[in-house]
Amino acid sequence: MKILHIMSIILLLSACNQPVTKSGEAPRPQKKADYAIVIHGGAGTITRANMTPQLDSTYRATMNAVLDQAEKLLHQGSDALDVAESCIIMMEDSPLFNAGKGAVLTHEAKHELDASVMHGASLNAGAVSGVSTVKNPISAARAVLEKSEHVMLSGDGADQFAHSLGLTQVENAYFTTERRKKSLESALRNEQGTGMTSEDEWIDYKFGTVGAVVLDKSGDIVAATSTGGMTNKKYGRIGDSPIIGSGTYADNRSCGVSCTGHGEYFIRLSVAHAVSQAMKHGDLSLEEAADLVIHTELQDLGGTGGLIALDSYGNVAMPFNTEGMYRAYLKPGERVVKIYKGE
Ligand code: ASP
């Protein structure tokens, strides 16, 4: 009798300790995914109207290839840091995205690349900003995390650090593509207000930043982001992507987040950290926290973009307030690949 009484007190207490959602209801019991990955390839003016069917299927095939690789690695028990880095490298090496090869051009027609990575178990992080010769900036960011006592290195020093560790170096021109040359020409015409073409209307000057958030079999979450920044950027401008807390954040106790969009707004709102804090201290679910930050805070400030996020159960959120966002996720038995709003 006494044992039964103690049992019912324990049950009552644990019911009281159940997290409560914003709506005030106790959440349904959650099933934990063995592993999960969510990726993005940038948010912006991405509509069916300004996309050819071939380009549409090339983007989907590339995102599927990234998920295939992640699935293979996660299934065999690779850790989240290895999986996040290898997925970002695939997207940096693809000319489709604004990261690594295919990165946007600065005002001086050069490439200055930013990347960051964070580990949710230790809260260790590494980032590089304004690098111009390391072939895969995400590997340089990982090297800062693992092989330096710092969190962020910038410019030539960051390239030298990567070089000293044997990371592949390339000529800056390696990153250039015809598409990004056209974007810069268009941005310059826009800036000068002369000789605008009909194409200039829908050329987006930044979309294509890449990101990955991974949950591995041991329950660790890693978030990573890589970008060329914004077309026609000047004076060594740095966006949110290499800033821990703005473009990237990971904490096993809440979630991992990678952002994309107009970086200045994401910096001002510390978007990635804000999502984690809303979960940890506001008792919001992943989806509620991510929606609040993108659809209320970012929206109210007038910023555009989106984020991908994943929690320790493998729940995924991918909110954005632009026309589209290249996005995809995978967990055992589930695969989603999307581009446009409302898809
Ligand atoms: N957030 C990046 C930046 O502002 C650009 C992007 O995500 O499209 O540098």
Image: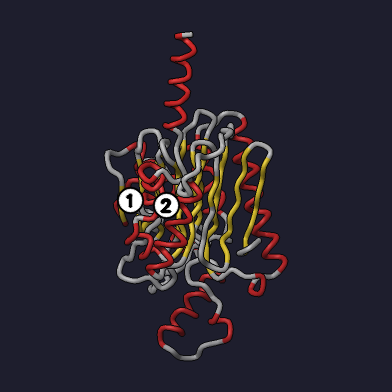
Callout count: 2
Counting from the top left corner in percent of width and height, residue 84 is at: 50, 42
Camera sees residue 224:
no
Compared to 320, does 166 lie above or below?
above
Mark before the other along the chain sequence, 2 or 1: 2
Decide which of 228, 50 is in the foreground and name it.
Answer: 50
Q: The C terminus lies in which quarter of the figure?
A: bottom right
**Furthest-front residue in this view:** 1
Decide which of 222, 161 is in the foreground and name it.
Answer: 222
**Furthest-right residue in this view:** 53
Amino acid type of the residue that numbered disc 1 sits on in the rendered structure = Ala
Camera sees residue 16:
yes
The dot on residue 184 is none
Crowding at dot 2, Cα within 10 Å, few <14 / some 14-19 / many 20+, comes out as many
Q: According to the image, what is the colour scheme of the structure?
A: secondary structure
Q: Residue at x 53, y 81 (%)?
A: 200
Which quadrant holds residue 296? Answer: bottom left
**Residue for badge 1:** 158
Could you tell me which secondary element the residue under label 2 belongs to?
A: loop
Amino acid type of the residue that numbered disc 2 sits on in the rendered structure = Val
Q: Residue at x 36, y 36 (%)?
A: 146
Left or right side of 343 for 182: left
Q: Residue at x 30, y 45 (%)?
A: 151
The dot on residue 134 is 2
Could you tell me which secondary element the residue under label 1 belongs to?
A: helix
